[in-house]
Image: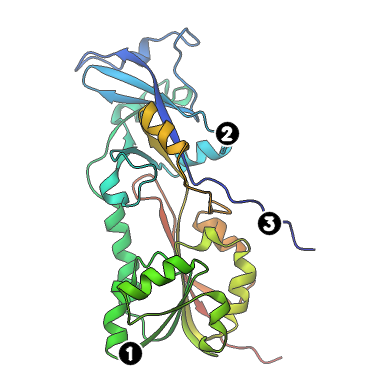
Amino acid sequence: MRAPVEPPRANSFNFVPVRDLARVRGAPCPLRALPDPGPLGLGDRARQLWLRAPDRLRLFQTFTADFDQRELARVKWDHGQLYADVSRKAAPDDFAADLVKLRPARECATCERRHGCAGAYVFEPGDVFTRDDAAVRAHLEGLRGAVLDLGCGEGRYLGALRPAVERGELRYLGVDPDTAALERLRQLHPWADVRSPEELGAACPAALDHLLVLRSWNHLAEPRSVLSDLVARLRPGGTVLVVDNVAFGLLRDREHARRAEAGPARFEHFRNDAAADAAARLEGLPLARLELHEVHPSCSNQWLLRYERLPEVDP
């Protein structure tokens, strides 16, 4: 019996400032001197963090009800996906420009109180998003043959596929349920054959060389069922490339957070799978895993899975 589909959910949450603690430049971390427990305390390790500035530590807290303690701890400590939102947008749409990554302050690694503290964080220089995206584009630029792009509406990677299409080395077909997004893609990329699921029909090749699921995995209500049907169309040796993002936390001032939470954005993610979660859902399909790049604290919130279609086995 098929499990019921969960309703869409959030893929990010806000941290807002709560209070400040004075800090003297060059002096030991003032959190070391706090009583535990005390009137201020070291903070909730899942729901709070301290942002370090030259003259103070500022405590931020998330009041989200969309994520439980286990999920919040996974975002913060396992995946390390915390960012300061330097835009004023309700929803950041250019992560490289809009977000600045946070990392734990170096002295936290050796602090004797670290296991009971929310942790002090500093800004991490550099653009992790563009760096991690470059690996995806490199894969796409090498594709040849018949390609089906499942959930193509964002159109983020079409520029990497266009040269091979124009040379006649790649046949591209994209599918997405968002008709407005498809119309935008037709205007911007007239070379790309993009269709709604209802229009797909006979346009989908009987034999595919590559299947792409680029930042659409967590938008699929039943990804295993969908991929099982499409993997059956893959030629032996054909590939599946799955790329998506885990949930992340955003540091914002209270007004920015209020506007964002009151904005028109709707939930579109059925899950916040990481690479290992997605790989577990695909177990048992006739696929051999070639790559698994999981999210970790020194990278962006984007993960990657790549598979090869196994040859048919005679009964």
Q: Are marks 1 and 2 in contact (CB under 8 Å)?
A: no
Where disc 1 sits, the SS reads loop
Q: Amino acid at mark 3?
A: Val
Q: Which residue is mark 2?
A: 65
- What residue is drawn where x is 31% and y is 52%? 94
Q: Position of residue 105 (x, y in %)?
A: 30, 30
- What residue is drawn where x is 43% and y is 31%? 258
| Relative vertical location of residue 205 with respect to residue 43 in this rendering, above or below | below
| Relative vertical location of residue 48 with respect to residue 37 in this rendering, above or below | below
Q: Amino acid at mark 2?
A: Ala
Question: How far is disc 2 from disc 3 in space, using C-alphas?
Answer: 20 Å
Can you tell which quarter of the image residue 303 is in? bottom left
Mark toward the start of the polypeptide (2 vs 3): 3
Can you tell which quarter of the image residue 87 is in? top left
Q: Amino acid at mark 1?
A: Glu
Where disc 2 sits, the SS reads loop
On screen, residue 146 versus residue 56, left or right, reads right
Q: Position of residue 33 (x, y in %)?
A: 36, 10
Q: Nearer the viewer, residue 108 or 50?
A: 50
Can you tell which quarter of the image residue 1 is in? bottom right
Where residue 169 is drawn, which disc sits there?
Answer: 1
Q: Nearer the viewer, residue 294 or 53?
A: 53
Q: Which residue is mark 3?
A: 5
